[in-house]
Image: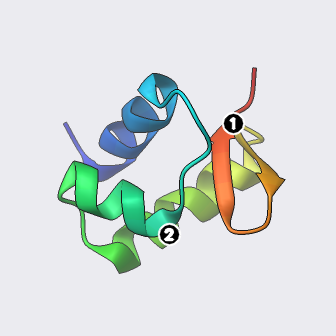
Amino acid sequence: MDSYEKVLDFFSKADKPVSAGEVAAATGVDRKEVDKVMKKLKKEEKIVSPKRCYWQINK
């Protein structure tokens, strides 16, 4: 499983909005890599931000 899949899988299982740091800690993916993946997910509109610096899966 690559980092994109790990991060997307984490977001799909998260029950509340999470920060990039929480994603990095939970998935074991480097923070810089998490930022790159999240940027891609935002562009694809797969994640949205309900409040500043926190993200959740777009339902």
Look at the picture and state if 33 lies above or below 48: below
Residue 21 at what x, y percent from top left? 41, 69
Residue located beneath label 2 in the image: 36
Which image quarter holds the C terminus?
top right
Q: Identify the image quadrant of residue 39.
A: bottom right
Look at the picture and state if 1 lies above or below 20: above
Residue contact between numbered discs 1 and 2, judged by CB atoms under 8 Å: no
The numbered mark, 1 or 2, whose residue comes first in the sequence reads 2
Relative to 15, 31 lies left or right:
left
Look at the picture and state if 57 lies above or below 17: above
Q: Residue furthest bottom?
A: 32
Relative to 59, 1 lies left or right:
left
Task: Say what secondary structure mark 1 lies in.
Answer: loop
Tell me if mark 1 has few (under 14), some (14-19) or many (20+) residues whose alpha carbon lies within 10 angstroms of its own: some
Which residue type does callout 1 highlight? Lys
Residue 41 at what x, y percent from top left? 62, 48
Query: Residue at image x 68%, y 68%?
Result: 53
Q: Identify the image quadrant of residue 28.
A: bottom left
Residue 4 at what x, y percent from top left? 39, 47
Residue 33 at what x, y percent from top left? 36, 70
Tell me if mark 2 has few (under 14), some (14-19) or many (20+) residues whose alpha carbon lies within 10 angstroms of its own: few
Which image quarter holds the N terminus?
top left
Relative to 49, 35 lies left or right:
left
Query: Residue at image x 24%, y 50%?
Result: 27
Query: Residue at image x 61%, y 56%?
Result: 40
Which residue type does callout 2 highlight? Lys
Residue located beneath label 1 in the image: 46
Task: Say what secondary structure mark 2 lies in.
Answer: helix
Query: Residue at image x 25%, y 51%?
Result: 26
